[in-house]
Amino acid sequence: MHTRLLAGLWAASSLLLLLVTYSQASPIDEWSETVVAKATSHDGWEHLVRRSAKSAEAQGIEDDTAHIQDVQEYYRNIFASDNDWDDASPLRLSSPAEVHNLRVVQSLEAYLQAKTDQEKAKVESADQSVVPDQSQQKKIKGRYIVTLSSESSDEMLDRTLSIMKYATSVSQQRLRADHITAFRRAGKGFSGTLSSKMVELLRKHPLVTSIEEDVAIRKSYSSFSSEPSSVDGISGTLSVQSETETPNANSDAKLGTSSSAVPWNLDRIDQHTATPLDGQYNPEATGKGVDVFIVDTGIRYTHKDLGGRAKYAGLDVIDQLTGSSLNGLDCQGHGSHVAGVVGGDTYGVAKGATLYSLRGLDCGGTGAVSGVVTALEYIANYPSTNPKVISLSLGVDSSAALDNGLRELVNKHGITAVSASGNNGLDSCNFSPASSGVTIDVGATDNGDEVASFSNTGACTDIFAPGKMINSVGFGCDTCTKVMSGTSMACPHVTGYVAVLLELQPTLKPSQVLENIVAKSTKDAIRLNYVSNKDTAARTPNRLLYVPSLGAADADSTLKN
């Protein structure tokens, strides 16, 4: 009796606190009342009991005392502990009518359970029918990302989360919301583990604009060939863009073994003409004083080519999820390679930039869309007065939460974001982050200025950069190198140049950064022979990244602020 009384008092006081805290009228008042009512009503079963009992009595149902004990046990397991059972008088069954009602409820429950089992079987069957060798990446069961409208206030978000917490505590987990992570600057909303009934209620929330299942990501390399194959085509999967490696890419290749002091890709982007390359790369700035956030598999901080400029950003999403303690250290290789192209002493575009590791993908290349959104939120709140740029060599078929988070980050908080177009050989507008419309989206070319066969193209691709057979930092040792191909390798070229621009003009807005990159780019130099869709080819901007050399006539002539 005391347990039930204390529980009732706690629930009542919690509800009173919510009502007092949010006493002013708001758009979600009616929704909040609905959630509370659902959480405390046992789904209206008691009402069903009373209504069915009257029907049973009217039909003159005979006594059926043989089932009374089973009935009581059934309700004891659902509604009451053993200690409270004697006081749970509204739930005790002793009449034939109540037994009849129980059978109604049990039949309904059995039907619903059977239906649930059928749906589950369909899902499991669908999972098993995924085309082999394309992807093993799946949606995370029970995990969702909920986005509120841009007009929603922090107070409305807080109230929504409080109501959900209250409902979870009093509904015996039928309305469940656990492991909640809120985001306020990378959009407005939250991610978490939600029961199906909570999702149903959230769909009726007046400020909710989208609810999407969180997506698991799985990194895999395709085997080496003369051209990287199109990969990552499964709908609804996020991944770092799959690349190819040269044979022996994980071998003992070391710094200083290149036949040229300047990698071909850097040599190419600092001149408008394709040939002859002059063996030089001397940009007008190095990106010093600019913070580059690399959301990826981590960075090998101690690699010699990174010059001590690689640092832990302070958040490792994978550590939070798994309890590991790598603190942004790369155990896969992709992120270190990207960091080297952004700012390595030998292989980097911006050789003075600070490189922050924000690990959102684990040692197998696995993570979640919600983790990327969490990373964006962290960057927006990062306590630094330096100009910021984000490098995103990853992608997903479609994510309203990721796109919305990027729009908020870029448009409201003035942080430039650069993304890889993707390696599907398709229209980049069908993939996030490109579909957000606010990132500087980068496609890949080879050493002959041909658009790589794997590269996505189209109107959402803003510019191209070298992305085939790119040598950069390896993660196996402090002097190891690796050759990789993919739009993931093209993206950091542009990220590095953004750092160069922001050193020269720290107050440039993201739109101005893009304007300058487009204005300076080499026009009509690339060939699109591998783009099979002619409409997509016609919408693809023919621009190749150009990084003016120190002292060049065009070094500062088009720089705008």
Image: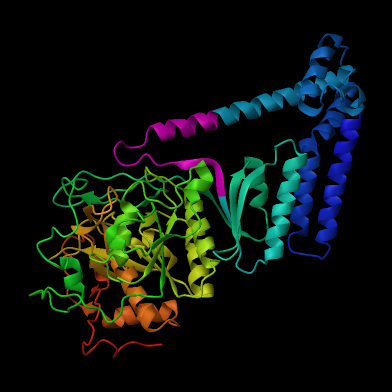
The x, y position of residue 317, in whole percent, is 49, 51
Quadrant position of the N terminus in the picture: top right
Residue, x 63% and y 27% (percent of image)?
113
The x, y position of residue 218, in whole percent, is 38, 44
Quarter residue 337 falls in: bottom left
Membership of 449 in magenta stretch: no
Magenta residues (range) = 118-144
The x, y position of residue 401, in whole percent, is 51, 58
Q: Looking at the picture, does residue 61 appear above or below residue 42?
A: above
Determine whether, in the image, residue 332 is placed left or right of residue 121: left
Determine whether, in the image, residue 64 is placed left or right of residue 366: right
Residue, x 33% and y 72% (percent of image)?
352
The x, y position of residue 346, in whole percent, is 23, 65
Quadrant position of the C terminus in the picture: bottom left
Which residue is the extreme one toward the top? 66
Which residue is the extreme one toward the left? 276
Residue, x 70% and y 23% (percent of image)?
107
Q: Pick the residue in front: 74 or 287.
A: 287
Q: Looking at the picture, does residue 11 appear above or below residue 301?
A: above
Instruction: Tell me, yes or no, if residue 62 can be seen here.
Output: yes
Determine whether, in the image, residue 3 is placed left or right of residue 542: right
Residue, x 45% and y 75% (percent of image)?
387
Determine whether, in the image, residue 322 is placed left or right of residue 188: left
Quarter residue 175 falls in: top right
Q: Looking at the picture, does residue 556 appear above or below residue 174?
A: below
Q: Pick the residue in front: 554 or 195.
A: 554
